[in-house]
Structures are given as structure tokens and as C-alpha cells.
Amino acid sequence: MAADRRSSWLKGVLDLLVLSRLTDGESYGYEIAKALAEAGLGEIKGGTLYPVLNRLEEAGLVEAEFRAAERGPGRRYYRLTALGRERLTAESGAWLAFHRAVQTMLSPGGTTP
Amino acid sequence: MTTDAYFAELSGSLRAAHVPDEQIAATVEDLRAHLAETGTAPEEEFGPAAAFAAQLGGLAPTPGEPDGRAESWTWTADLFNDRRMLAVHGDQGWEVESLDPLGRFVCRRSATAALRWEYRREIIGARRRTKVLAELEPEGWELCGEWLVYGYFKRPRAATAGPAGALGARPAAPHRRLFLSRRGKLALAVWAVVVGGATAACFIGTLGMGGLAITIALTSMFSALFTSHLETAKGRVDQDRSVSS
């Protein structure tokens, strides 16, 4: 049940987490998934991550560039666009406001600790 | 399935979705690079190839994505009819996004999506929930709504039918919103007669408001029990038939 809930929570915020991972510079799918796992968000399967990256690209929030590698298969690198940065700021604010409201409701006595 | 067979199927499905060859080649290479680092099998990492292609190739509408051109339609059916009607409407490209508090299927059909949907209903009581989800999610089923003890799951038909799961004709959204079976109509008629009688009795003073409320509650409860009993019995018969065949 707990894992089921976490997966639902993640679904609502995964696009923002992916955008936030790109604020420091470009990255690629596996590196993004690894960073999210290291941040304690659990394992994000490629089957979940790549459709999100595709949608962000289609929406113009990230730009992708495929680069061939000298050894092994090439990779698609993603970079945040100005629109993506703008969207991230706005939506992060909305998420944090929602998070504070949940925290207030769930804290003992209904007040923020 | 081998990695090469997986990517062959993925490429075929993306091609069927009119994704340019150059983009398919780059996608496959990128995904192979991903697998080289995770060390996992493609199906384990990305799910069934055709369903994954549907999500990557823009065939599948995005849950929650704002799409001004998407059609929306809300409808309901009784427990005897829901699976049949879900199959009919799923074939016409309607994707169930959720069940609203009244138990109605809230659907959308993207203007750009060209995908048929299949559905299944399972009993997901507290104890069965984890087991059912663990069994169905690896097969590409996604829980799209819950009503009482029933969980409704959806999956793009492309997950099993490949490119044949794409939507052909696009019939207009039905005007009807209620699809009752004969048994559903009968249960509703009995409910209406009993509740109507109790309301009339309340008006002429032979039944108090408390009595009316209790009658409505009991009738609703027995009606729900009756329909779910019939449906459970039918489910057992269907199950026995499928086991014996």
C-alpha cells in the first residue's frame, strides 16, 4: 500500500523532478533516474521516465540532442529551455504550497511544526 | 524475449505510429545505452514493447495533459453491463481517466491519439489489492478507477495487438450517458417502487422521516447486495466455463 501511494505521489510530480535535475546543466535518461533514486525517490524505470522526457520535449520545456558515442551506443542529452525554467519555477511554487497545506493537515493539532 | 527482438518490436510499433526512421534509430540507441548501465532486461525496464512504443510515439494520450482538442465524455453502467460497455467504448478510443464519486466513468479521447483501449475489472479488497496490482502492472495494466471493492484497469490495446491496436474509425461521442442491463433496470425499478411507496407513505403521514430514511437505506443496500450477488454468481459461472474449456 505504501509503495502504491508513493508511486501515485511520484506520478504527479515526476515531470517537475526531471526538470529540476536539469537546472545545473544537461543530463541523460539513466543519469536522471540515478539522481532521483539517490535523492530517495525510489527506482524510476525507463518505461516511466522516457515518456515523461518525450512529453517535456514536445512541450518545449527541454531540448534534446542525440550524440553518438566513441564506444557503445549513443545517448540523447536533455537541456532545460527558458520556458522549462519558467514552468519549473511556477509549478514548484504551486507544489510547495500544496505540500505545506498537506503538512499542516497531517501535523498533530493541524498546525505546521 | 531477447533484447534484439524487443527493439525490433519497438521499432515496428514506432514505425506504425509514423515516427520518422531517424528518430526511431536514435531512440533505440539511447534505450540500449540505458540498459547497458542498468543491466536489466528490456521488458523489465520499459514494459511490453508495443505499450511502451504507444507512449513514446505519441499514440497514447498523456494522463492529465492539458489538451484543448481532446473530447471528454462521462457515462455509467450497472455492474452487469460495465465490462461490455467498457470494451465497446475502449474500441472507439475512449480512455477512462477516473471514476467520479457517483461511480461514473470519466473518459477522454485525444484528438491526436489513435489508440484503442482494453479494460478489466477485478475485486481489489484490502487484502487482494497488492497481489492484484503486482500481477497486472507488469502486464501493462494501470488502475484507472475504483468503485466499492472493484478496481478498473486499462491498457492500450497495442500492448497485445501491436500496430493493430491503433484506432481506425472515430465514431462521434455517444449522446447516451447511462447503459443499464435488463437486470440493472429491474433492480432500479424495484428500488424506485419501494422508495416511491415509502415517500408516498411519508407524505400521507403513515411513515415518519426516520422511517423513510431507513427504507431508502435498506432498499439501496439490498439492491446493491442483490446486484453484486448476481454478478458474483455470473463471474463464478464464467470462471468455471473458462477453466473447463
Image: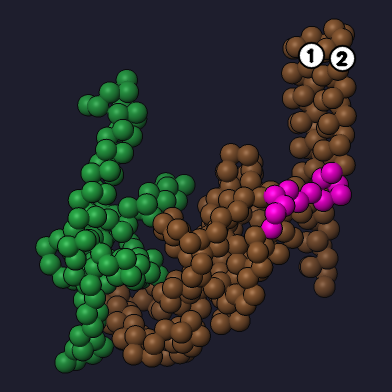
Chain colours: A green, B brown
Q: Amino acid at mark 2?
A: Ala
Range covered by the magenta-colored residues: B174-185
| SS class, disc 2 | helix
| Residue underneath mark 1 | B211
Is residue B104 shown to the viewer in this render? yes
Query: Are the residues flagged by discs 2 and 1 in contact, CB closer than 8 Å?
Result: yes
Q: Quadrant of residue A71?
A: bottom left
Q: Secondary structure at mark 1?
A: helix
- Neighbour tally class for label 1: few under 14, some 14-19, many 20 plus, Cα within 10 Å: some
Question: Looking at numbered disc 1 in the image, what kind of residue is underneath it?
Answer: Gly
Q: Position of residue A14 (x, y in %)?
A: 32, 57
Would you place residue A109 above or below residue B82 in this image?
Answer: above
**Residue B124 visible in the snapshot:** no
The structure residue drawn at horizontal position 25% and vertical position 64%, both measured from the top left corner, is: A61
Residue that appears at 31% across and 39% down: A98
- The residue located at (31%, 59%) in the rendering is A15
Label located before the other in sequence (2 or 1): 2
Mark 2 belongs to chain: B
Between A76 and B1, which is closer to the camera in this rendering?
A: A76
Per the rendering, the mark at residue B201 is: 2
Direction top: furthest residue: B205
Chain assignment, label 1 = B
Query: Is residue B68 or residue B82 the one in the foreground?
Result: B68
